[in-house]
Amino acid sequence: MVKCSICKSEVKELFLGKLKGTIIHKPGSSKQYPICFDCQKKFPSKDKLLENMLKG
Ligand SMILES: [Zn+2]
């Protein structure tokens, strides 16, 4: 199960491993952070997503 890096709730998978949401990278890192659709809507820019992700 994939968990959102911000709200920790489950990120639903669509098909072929695609997530209902997005994947972001921290600057300078190749690690991937899944973000759920709801958080993607709440924080429409990558900067906002990173900011909120790092807080949690
Ligand atoms: Zn979320």
Image (cartoon, rainbow, N blue to C red):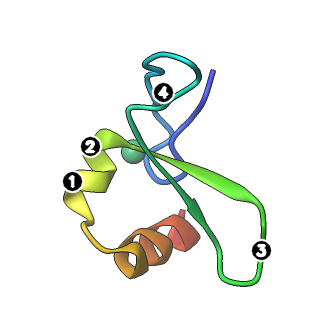
Q: Horizontal and vertical percent for residue 26? A: 65, 74
Q: 27 and 54: which one is in front? A: 27
Q: 10 and 22: which one is in front? A: 22
Residue 27 circle label: none
Task: Find out if the beta carbon at label 2 lies less than 8 Å from the nearest ligand 1 atom.
Answer: yes
Label 1: state its secondary structure.
helix
Q: Which residue is mark 1?
A: 41
Disc nearer the start of the sequence (4/3): 4
**Amino acid of disc 3:** Ser
**Amino acid of disc 4:** Glu
Residue 29 circle label: 3
Q: Quadrant of the C terminus?
A: bottom right
**Amino acid of disc 2:** Asp
Residues at discs 1 and 3 in contact (Cβ within 8 Å)? no
C-alpha distance separating marks 4 and 2: 11 Å
Residue at the outermost front position:
16
**Amino acid of disc 1:** Lys
